[in-house]
Image (tube, rainbow, N blue to C red):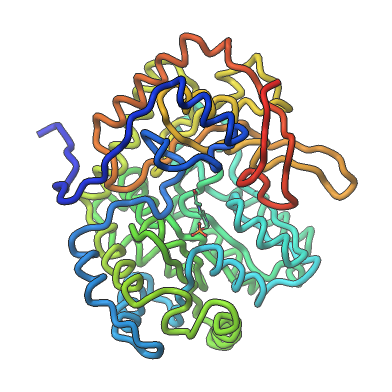
């Protein structure tokens, strides 16, 4: 059959409360045009993030009941550790309460003031954690990533020549680790090819620089490799995942993405000495190394989620359903990053709303309009998130003004996505009327979470 169906049935449902556009205007005003500040009950379709918002399976819920809540050496940890070791092949597995906790421990133990950390693109929490220890995050994504219309299938790739030049320029002693984000969330959820992972690894090993993957969406990345990279169409996702991690010295993972859990994360490393240091820090702030800020039931949910996320029927549905939304927006003439990524569609708000200058946040303006029009919550990935003021008080802007429609895993059906498409068609007809915004309050770091804005 040609129709790709959701490979699951629904056993438990969560009602969605429908509200009116007039009500939403008031709600948004009281939230100062920041969608992070509105209540979830006031949202009809929540595409703010794919993080922690997936629907767990009956097997995962059964695991929740099996959770062993012993402080030390619980069965749930043994299962969690074994699952990750078998799947990813690392020697030391350190549980954390979510991805950014793994990042904080990774950078606090390996990076010092004045160091440089290259990546394809750092995600916002990775960037903030690098900056927090006084180091400098650098984005070295390939040039194809900048052309939103190119059909290049691996726009998440690191530019190897740039990385080589970067190592020569900054010096090996100033680069304590190289990171690579799979898939590249900030760059449009674009995958990284196996060839690129291998090349980064080779360069890192030549210079004896540790190589870490930010692997939140490793399974989606593996599926794209299977679909689009020569030599991988007959390999299983399990094999592709194993090969991916074999090139790295460790990884940080948010289990809220490709482990389809509502909370959780982990840090892996092959370096036993480093693992000891990381565990000491873990004990200080997260918890004992066999639970690391999670309950036994969370560890069970993560472990089962990891087993389910590499099933090909699931990945086919996942990637195809994101592609469906992208295809329909392309047909409407709404500019998006092509080809569609794994977990989200990114609208190019600067191109869609050319009458709004970047200092008035076209991405945020579009995100607000999507809420008013259809109760859809999305996130701006533009100058509200990545812009700000430098040390001298000079204002800087992001490279792109995007709006991300992140698709929670196994949560919405095709009719929900068709509704989103209808809302976008309606916005397109009156897009020239949408007004920009200005900031009236912002915090020191990660300002997009709490900023207050008003219409200009
Ligand atoms: N790395 C990447 C690539 C991410 O996308 C995220 C989270 C993290 C690290 C941090 O993980 O949230 O568990 O602490 N991304 C979410 C998002 C928040 O909406 O894309 P966390």
Position of 244 relative to 88 (above/below):
above
Image position of 239 with respect to 432: above or below: below
In this orientation, which residue lies closer to the viewer: 92 or 9? Answer: 9
Q: Is residue 146 visible?
A: no
Horizontal side of 349 relative to 261 (left or right) equals right
Res 448 quadrant in image? top right
- Residue 446, visible in the rendered structure: yes
Residue at 55%, 27% (x, y): give it: 348
In the rendered view, tell whether residue 322 sits above or below residue 302: above
Query: Looking at the figure, which quarter contains the C terminus?
Result: top right
Q: Nearer the viewer, residue 2 or 199?
A: 2
Identify the image quadrant of the N terminus: top left
Residue at image location 53% in from the left, 26% down from the top: 26
- Residue 186 horizontal/vertical position (percent): 55, 45
> In the depicted view, which residue is nearer to us: 379 or 193?
379
- Picture coordinates of residue 204, whole percent (x, y): 60, 67
Q: What residue is rendered at 53% in x and 58% in y? A: 199
Q: Residue furthest left?
A: 1
Q: Is residue 123 left or right of residue 324?
A: right
Q: Residue at x 19, y 50 (%)?
A: 12
Locate residue 10, reporting x and y percent. 16, 47
Figure label count = 0
In the rendered image of this protein, does residue 233 appear above or below residue 175?
Answer: above
Farthest residue in the bottom direction? 72
Residue 209 on image: x %, y %: 64, 71
Judge by depth and name the residue closer to the eye, 191 or 263: 263
């Amino acid at each position: 059959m040609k129709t790709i169906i959701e490979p699951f049935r629904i056993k438990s449902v969560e009602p969605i409360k429908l509200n009116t556009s007039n009500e939403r205007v008031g709600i948004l005003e009281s939230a100062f045009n920041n969608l992070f500040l509105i209540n979830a009950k006031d949202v009809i379709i929540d595409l703010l993030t794919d993080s922690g918002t997936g629907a767990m399976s009956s097997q995962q819920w059964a695991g929740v009941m099996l959770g062993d809540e012993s402080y030390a050496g619980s069965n749930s940890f043994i299962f969690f550790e074994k699952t990750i070791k078998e799947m990813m092949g690392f020697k030391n597995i350190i549980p954390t309460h979510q991805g950014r906790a793994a990042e904080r421990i990774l950078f606090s133990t390996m990076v010092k003031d004045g160091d440089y950390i290259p990546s394809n693109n750092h995600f916002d929490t990775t960037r903030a954690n690098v900056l927090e220890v006084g180091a400098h995050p650098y984005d070295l994504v390939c040039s194809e990533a900048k052309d939103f219309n190119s059909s290049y299938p691996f726009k998440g790739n690191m530019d190897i020549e740039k990385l080589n030049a970067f190592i020569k320029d900054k010096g090996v002693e100033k680069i304590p680790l190289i990171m690579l984000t799979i898939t590249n969330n900030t760059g449009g959820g674009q995958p990284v090819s196996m060839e690129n992972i291998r090349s980064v690894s080779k360069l890192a090993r030549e210079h004896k620089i540790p190589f870490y993957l930010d692997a939140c969406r490793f399974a989606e990345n593996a599926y794209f490799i299977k679909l689009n990279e020569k030599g991988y169409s007959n390999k299983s996702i399990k094999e592709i995942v194993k090969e991916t991690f074999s090139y790295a010295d460790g990884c940080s993972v948010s289990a809220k993405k490709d482990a389809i859990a509502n909370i959780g994360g982990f840090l892996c490393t092959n370096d036993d000495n480093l693992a000891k240091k990381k565990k000491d820090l873990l004990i200080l702030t997260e918890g004992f190394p066999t639970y690391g800020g999670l309950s036994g039931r969370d560890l069970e949910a993560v472990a089962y989620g990891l087993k389910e996320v590499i099933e090909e029927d699931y990945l086919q549905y996942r990637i195809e359903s994101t592609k469906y939304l992208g295809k329909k927006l392309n047909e409407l003439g709404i500019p998006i990053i092509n080809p569609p990524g794994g977990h989200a569609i990114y609208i190019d708000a600067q191109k869609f709303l050319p009458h709004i200058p970047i200092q008035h946040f076209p991405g945020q303006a579009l995100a607000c309009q999507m809420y008013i029009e259809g109760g859809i919550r999305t996130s701006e990935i533009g100058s509200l998130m990545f812009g700000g003021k430098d040390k001298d008080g000079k204002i800087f802007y992001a490279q792109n003004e995007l709006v991300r429609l992140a698709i929670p895993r196994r949560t919405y059906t095709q009719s929900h996505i068709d509704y989103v498409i209808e809302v976008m068609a309606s916005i397109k007809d009156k897009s020239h009327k949408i007004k920009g915004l200005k900031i009236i309050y912002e915090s020191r770091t990660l300002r997009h979470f709490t900023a207050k804005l008003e219409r200009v």
